[in-house]
Amino acid sequence: MALTATGIGSGLDIKGLVSQIMSVERQPLKRLDAQKQNLNNQISGFGQIKSAVSQLQSALEALKNKDTFTAVKTTVAQGADFTASAKAGAAVGQYEISVQQLAQAQRVATSATTQFDPSGGGDLTITVGSNSTTINVAAGTTIEQLRDQINAANAGVTASVINNGGVKQLVLTGKETGAANTFTLTGTGALSSLTFSNPNALPTGSNNALYRLQSAQDAQLTINGVQITRSKNTITDAIDNVTLTLTGASNTPKSLTLERDLTPAKNAIQNLANAYNALMDKIDQLGGYDAEKKRAGDLYGDASLRGLRNQVRQVLSQTITGVGDYQRLSDFGVEFSSTGRMTIKESKLTQALTANGADIATFFAGVGNTEGLSAKGIALTEGYTKTNGLIDMRVKGLQQSVKLLDAQKEAFEDRLARLQEMYLRQFNTMDSLLGRMNATGAYLSQQLTNLNR
C-alpha cells in the first residue's frame, strides 16, 4: 500500500519535495522517450523512402509495355455512321467508310388486336440455324409464363410481353444479329398460330396472328471502295487493330484517320522523371540538413540513402547496347541536370518518338536476351521494396531497438515507483520524528515555565 506524505509533524510539503526529487530521477526516462521518438521517426522515414522507390518501380514497369510507344489515335469525321477505336500497332492512314445497312436481329410479334392465348397448351419448337429446342407448354399457361419458359430455354430467342393498351403482345427477338441467325417456329395445339418456316414471308400487318417486325440482316459497309458484310455492328476484323462500331446507315462516305499518338509514351516517360525526382527529393529531405531551419533530417547521415541515390542514378544513366538506335536516356531528350534531377527536352523527345518510337520501346523493354532499362531498374528497386528487402531489414532492426527501449522504460518505471515509495516512507518517518521532537520541546518549555513561576 502506497504511503501518504502529510507533513503534519514537520509542516513540510512532503508531496512537493518528493515530486521535485522524482522529477530529477525521471530525467533518464525523458532521454529514453527521445531515443524512441528518434527511432520511430527513422522507421517512418524509411517507409517514405520505400513508397518513393515503389513509385519509381511502377513507372519502370509501365515503360516495359511496348504498346505504349506504338499507340494510335482515331479521328472520325463529323456525322459519320460509325465510331472507331484503334489498338497499338494499327497502321496509320486514312479510310473512306460508308454504311449501307446495319446488322439487326429478327423480331416477330403476336397480333396487336387479338390477344394470343396459350392456355390450351401444346409444344413450341424454336429453330435457329441447325439447332432446335422444343418447349412443352402445359394447359393453363399464361402469356407471361410462356415468356418465362422461352427465356429459360436459352434457345437463341428472347421473349417479352408488351401491353399496347388494348391487348398483350408476345414479342420474340433473336439473340444474335445477322442473316445467319434467323429463326423459325413450329407450334402445336394452342401454339400452332406461332408456326412459320420462312421469316421473310411473314406478313407485316399487325392484325395478323403473327407478323414480322424486322428481318434478320447483316451489316453492309464500304471501306475504301471495298464492300464488307458482317453479322454484327461491331467489326474488329476489317482493318487490323481497329474496331468499328456502326451507328447508322445513311450510305454517306465519311473519313477515318489513324495517326500516331505520342501522348501515352510521353506520359510514361514523364512519370519516370517525376518518380525519380520525387525519390531524390525525399532522400534530400530525410538524409540532409536544412540550414535555414537548422534541423537535420530523420535519416541524416544514413549510408544506405547515399547508396540508394548512387545506385539509382548509375542504373538510369547507363548505356545499353544492342537495343536499337537509342542507347541512353539522353539520346531521346531525357537528361540529368546539375542538381541531379531528371529533365525532359520536349522537342527532342517528340522528334525521337515520331521518327522511331519502336526503338525507344526496345530501349526500355529490351530485346531477345538483352535486358532493357526497365528490367535493370526494376531489379535494383525490388532489392529495396520486396519483403525482407534492404528497407524491410533496416526497419525490422529499428523496430527491435524500439522494443528494447520499451523494455528499458518499463524496468525504469518500476524502479521509479519503488524509489518514490522509499522517499515517501523516509520523509514520513522524518515527519513522525519531528512531530515527537516538537511535542517533547513543547512539554519541556511548559515545565520550565512552571518552574520559573
Image (spheres, helix red, strand yellow):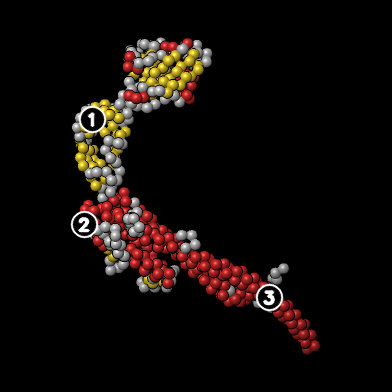
Please identify the quadrant where the C terminus is shown: bottom right
Mark found first going from the N terminus, 3 or 2 = 2
In this view, 203 is above or below 24: above
Q: Secondary structure at mark 2?
A: helix
Neighbour tally class for label 1: few under 14, some 14-19, many 20 plus, Cα within 10 Å: few
Q: Residue 385 location, x and y as percent?
A: 44, 60
Amino acid type, mark 2 = Ser
Image-quadrant location for residue 157: top left
Q: Which mark is residue 227?
A: 1
Amino acid type, mark 1 = Gln
Of circles 3 and 2, the one toward us is 2
Please identify the quadrant where the N terminus is shown: bottom right
Image-quadrant location for residue 102: top left
In the depicted view, which residue is nearer to us: 50 or 441?
A: 50
Q: Which mark is residue 422?
A: 3
Residue drawn at x 70%, y 71% is 3
In the depicted view, which residue is nearer to us: 393 or 25?
A: 393
Residue drawn at x 57%, y 72% is 29
Q: How many marks?
A: 3
- In the drawing, does residue 180 fall left or right of residue 393? left
In the depicted view, which residue is nearer to us: 127 or 269?
A: 127
Q: Residue 53 location, x and y as percent?
A: 40, 61
Mark found first going from the N terminus, 1 or 2 = 1
Q: Residue 232 location, x and y as percent?
A: 32, 30
In this view, 258 is above or below 10: above
Neighbour tally class for label 3: few under 14, some 14-19, many 20 plus, Cα within 10 Å: some
Any part of residue 144 in sight: no
Amino acid type, mark 3 = Met
Q: Secondary structure at mark 3?
A: helix
Any part of residue 261 in sight: yes
Q: Residue 277 location, x and y as percent?
A: 34, 62
